[in-house]
Image (tube, grey):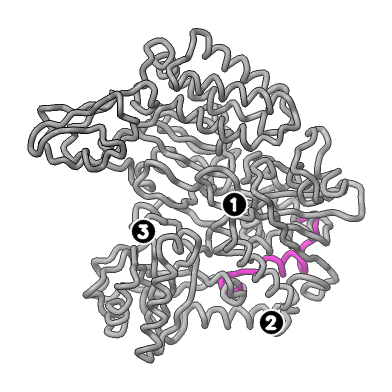
C-alpha cells in the first residue's frame, strides 16, 4: 500500500474505497461484530463462502460490523449493481443457498428483506455524493426503507456513522466515507488554537460519563506546562449492559484514530494510547489492524501529510477492573501500577500519565471529532439540547423488544427511546423503570417517561448519563433487588483504597441483603440514606462518589417497595425468594404435567389431567414451574 502524503493521494484512496463500497459486481456483506458472531454470523459467513466457491459465483463477500439492531442479527446486506442495498435479518447458514439463488435472479421470492437502503452518502473528493437515487424497482416497493423502520427513524448517526456500512479492516472504504479529510484539513489548513475553538464551539461534552466540556479540557492540556504531552482514549467500558464503545472500536476504528490525531495536533502531543478492555478481543484486533494500516500509509508516525507533525498510538489492554474506567486509575494502570484513583484536585491535564499533561476522552468522544471538523462546531451545536449538544449512543438492553445500539439527539424524550425506537416492553407488560449511567447511575421511574435524556435532566432526576447504558425494567422487577445487584457489583469492583467506599458500600450491601431476605428493620431506609451521604462526601473518586445512586434513586421513587419488604415482609414484584411462595391455582391447572417435569427437586405432584400441588417445604423457588406453565396456573405471591 502506497503512502498517503497529499490531498491527491487521499482522493485516490477514496476512489478505490468507493469502488469497493459500490462495486460493479454483486456484493454480500455479513455483520461480523461481537453481537453478530454471538448470533451465528460466522456460520452464515462460512456457509455463504463455501456456497459461492462451490457454484463458482462472481460475488464479493465481505465483513461489516453492527448496524445497531442486534435483536435482528445475524444481518446480511446484499448490493446488486445499480440497485438499493438490501438487508436480510436473522439469517442462518441453512438459508445461504436460497439467498444466493434469489440474488442471482434479482428477486426476493424465498427470503424477504428486512429493509432497503435507497440512498447512501459518500464524501469523496471533498464533496458529498449520493447514490441509489430515484424510485426503487417495482419488486422492492413493499420493502420499507431503513428510515421507515421505527428503530432507525429517529436516530441521527454521527459517532456510529460508518458502523455496519464499511469493512472495518478497509482504510480505503473509511476514506471513501470522508475519513481522514478532516485530519488533512486540520494539519494543513488550521492552527491548533482554531481546532480547539471549533471543538469548544461544538459544545461537545465527554461521552464517557463525566460530561466535561471536551474543548475546554483540550485547551487546559494545551496550555499546561511541559514539552511532552499525551492523548489517551478510554475504551475500558465496564458498565453492565453497555457496549457502545465496543461497537465503534469494532465497526469504525479509524474514526477513533483520526479523532485522536486531530486532538494530539491541537494539544501538542506526539504520543497516544488506547486503553481497551481485555474482554474485547475483536475491538483490540480491529484497532491494532487499523493502527498498523494507518502507520504503513503514513497517517500515523513521522511527518503526517508532510506537515512535520509526528504522532503514533499504542494499545494497552486492561485487566478487567471496573475502576480503571476512572481517569487517574486508568493512567496508573498504563504506568504498570495498581489501578487506583488519586485525589481529584490534581488535574490530569497538568499532571497525568507519568506526571505529564494528559488528555483523556472516551471512544465515542474521539469518534465525534472528525465529523465536527468536517462540518463545523456550529453544525454539531445545532443538534441536541442547549447544554448537551450533538447525539448520544445508548445500548438498549433488558426488558425491551428492540435490543440494540441507538444514537439519538441529546434531549430525545425517554418515551421515544423506549416505545418508538425500543418497540416497548415484551409481552405488553408495563414499563417500570430504566437504569441509566451504569452501576453508579440511578433508576428513572415510569412517571418520568417524558424526561428529555441529556446530561442535566438525568442529573436532576437523580441519575446520570454515564457512558450510555440503558437497562429497561418491567413490572416484574424488584427495585430493592436491583439496588442490591448494583451495590454488590460496585463492592466487588471497588479498589479498596479509601475507607468510605471500601467499607461503606460493603455495609450498604449487607443491609440490602437483609431487607431482601425479610430481615429488614425499621430505620434501615434512613440508615441507607445517611450512609450514602457519607460515602459520597468522603470517597476519593467518582466510583465511590456515585455508588449510592442506585440506592438513593430507588428509595426516592420506590420507597413503598422498601417499606413493604421491611414492614410487611413482602416483595411486591414477587422476586425476593425469602418473601415469596409458589402455588398452583386448581381452577386453572389442566394437569398437563409440564411443571412437574421441569421441577428440579420434584416437589410437584399430581395425576394427569388433574390439578397439581406444590410442596412448599421442598420448593427451592427457582421459578421453573412458573416459567413453563402455559395456562397461568402457577402463581407467586
Answer with mark 3 or mark 2, whichever residue precedes in sequence: 2
Residue drawn at (78%, 34%) of the image: 344
- Which disc number belongs to residue 380? 1
Q: Is residue 170 above or below residue 376?
A: below
The foreground one among 536 and 567 is 567
* Nearer the camera: disc 3 or disc 2: 3
Of the image marks 1 and 2, the number of the one nearer the N terminus: 2
Q: What residue does disc 2 label?
A: 8
Q: Position of residue 183 (x, y in %)?
A: 71, 66
- Which of pointers 3 and 1 indicates the residue nearer the eye? 3
**Quadrant occupied by the C terminus:** top left
Q: Residue at x 31, y 33 (%)?
A: 430
- Which of the 4 image quarters holds residue 49? bottom left
Element type where label 2 sits in the image: helix
Is 245 drawn above or below residue 85 in the view shown? above
Q: Upstream in the sequence, badge 3 or badge 1?
A: 3
Is residue 203 in sight in this rendering? no
Check the image and name the residue furthest to the left.
609
Residue 229 located left or right of residue 124: right
Residue 454 x, y percent position in the rendering: 54, 38
Residue 497: in magenta span: no
Is residue 184 located in the magenta-colored stretch of the structure?
yes
- For label 3, the residue is 72
Magenta region, residue range:
175-194
Residue 311, visible in the rendered structure: yes
Determine whether label 3 and label 2 are within 8 Å by CB: no
Q: Quadrant of residue 329?
A: top right
Amino acid at each position: 500500500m502506497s503512502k498517503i502524503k497529499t490531498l491527491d493521494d487521499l482522493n485516490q484512496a477514496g476512489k478505490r474505497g468507493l469502488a469497493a463500497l459500490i462495486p460493479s459486481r454483486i456484493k454480500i456483506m455479513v455483520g461480523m461484530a461481537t453481537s453478530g458472531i454471538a448470533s451465528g454470523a460466522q456460520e452464515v459467513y462460512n456457509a455463504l463462502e463455501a456456497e459461492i466457491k462451490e457454484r463458482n459465483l462472481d460475488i464479493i463477500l465481505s465483513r461489516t460490523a453492527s448496524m445497531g439492531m442486534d435483536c435482528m442479527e445475524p444481518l446480511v446486506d446484499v448490493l446488486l449493481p445499480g440497485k438499493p442495498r438490501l438487508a436480510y435479518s436473522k439469517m442462518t447458514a441453512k438459508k445461504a443457498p436460497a439467498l444466493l439463488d434469489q440474488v442471482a435472479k434479482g428477486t426476493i421470492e424465498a427470503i424477504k428483506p428486512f429493509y432497503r437502503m435507497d440512498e447512501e452518502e459518500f464524501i469523496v473528493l471533498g464533496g458529498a455524493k449520493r447514490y441509489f437515487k430515484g424510485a426503487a424497482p417495482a419488486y422492492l416497493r413493499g420493502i420499507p426503507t431503513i428510515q421507515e423502520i421505527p428503530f432507525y427513524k429517529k436516530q441521527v448517526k454521527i459517532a456510529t456513522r460508518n458502523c455496519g456500512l464499511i469493512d472495518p479492516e478497509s482504510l480505503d472504504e473509511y476514506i471513501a466515507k470522508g475519513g481522514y479529510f478532516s485530519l488533512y484539513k486540520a494539519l494543513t489548513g488550521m492552527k491548533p488554537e482554531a481546532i480547539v475553538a471549533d471543538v469548544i464551539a461544538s459544545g461537545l461534552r465527554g461521552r464517557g460519563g463525566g460530561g466535561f466540556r471536551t474543548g475546554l479540557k483540550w485547551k487546559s492540556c494545551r496550555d499546561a506546562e511541559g514539552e511532552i504531552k499525551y492523548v489517551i482514549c478510554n475504551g475500558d467500558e465496564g458498565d453492565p449492559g453497555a457496549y457502545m464503545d465496543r461497537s465503534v472500536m469494532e465497526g469504525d476504528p479509524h474514526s477513533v484514530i483520526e479523532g485522536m490525531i486531530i486532538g494530539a495536533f491541537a494539544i501538542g502531543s506526539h504520543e497516544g494510547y488506547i486503553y481497551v478492555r481485555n474482554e474485547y478481543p475483536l475491538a483490540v484486533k480491529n484497532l491494532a489492524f487499523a493502527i498498523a494500516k494507518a502507520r504503513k500509509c503514513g497517517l500515523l508516525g513521522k511527518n503526517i501529510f508532510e506537515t512535520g507533525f509526528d504522532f503514533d498510538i499504542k494499545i494497552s489492554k486492561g485487566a478487567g477492573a471496573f475502576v480503571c474506567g476512572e481517569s487517574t486509575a486508568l493512567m496508573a494502570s498504563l504506568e504498570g501500577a495498581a489501578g487506583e484513583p488519586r485525589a481529584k484536585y490534581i488535574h490530569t491535564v497538568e499532571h497525568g500519565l507519568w506526571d505529564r499533561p494528559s488528555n483523556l476522552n472516551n471512544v465515542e468522544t474521539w469518534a465525534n471529532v472528525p465529523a465536527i471538523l468536517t462540518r463545523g462546531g456550529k453544525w454539531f451545536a445545532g443538534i441536541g439540547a442547549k447544554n448537551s449538544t450533538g447525539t448520544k449512543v445508548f445500548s438498549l438492553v433488558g426488558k425491551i423488544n428492540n435490543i440494540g445500539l441507538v444514537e439519538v439527539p441529546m434531549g430525545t424524550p425517554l418515551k421515544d427511546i423506549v416505545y418508538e425506537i425500543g418497540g416497548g416492553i415484551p409481552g405488553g407488560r408495563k414499563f417500570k423503570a430504566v437504569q441509566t449511567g451504569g452501576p453508579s447511575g440511578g433508576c428513572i421511574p415510569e412517571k418520568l417517561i417524558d424526561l428529555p435524556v441529556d446530561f442535566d435532566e438525568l442529573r436532576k432526576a437523580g441519575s446520570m448519563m454515564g457512558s450510555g447504558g440503558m437497562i429497561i425494567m418491567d413490572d416484574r422487577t424488584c427495585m430493592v433487588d436491583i439496588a442490591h445487584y448494583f451495590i454488590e457489583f460496585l463492592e466487588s469492583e471497588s479498589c479498596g483504597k479509601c475507607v468510605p467506599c471500601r467499607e461503606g458500600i460493603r455495609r450498604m450491601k449487607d443491609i440490602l441483603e437483609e431487607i431482601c431476605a425479610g430481615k429488614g428493620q425499621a430505620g434501615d431506609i434512613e440508615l441507607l440514606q445517611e450512609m450514602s451521604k457519607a460515602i459520597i462526601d468522603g470517597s476519593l473518586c467518582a466510583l465511590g462518589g456515585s455508588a449510592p445512586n442506585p440506592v438513593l434513586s430507588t428509595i426516592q421513587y420506590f420507597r413503598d417497595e422498601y417499606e413493604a419488604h421491611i414492614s410487611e415482609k413482602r416483595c411486591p414484584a414477587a422476586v425476593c425468594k425469602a418473601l415469596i411462595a409458589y402455588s398452583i391455582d386448581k381452577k386453572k391447572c389442566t394437569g398437563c404435567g409440564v411443571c412437574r417435569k421441569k421441577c428440579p427437586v420434584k416437589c410437584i405432584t399430581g395425576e394427569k389431567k388433574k390439578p397439581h400441588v406444590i410442596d412448599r417445604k421442598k420448593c427451592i423457588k427457582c421459578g421453573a414451574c412458573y416459567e413453563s406453565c402455559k395456562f397461568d396456573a402457577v402463581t407467586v405471591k
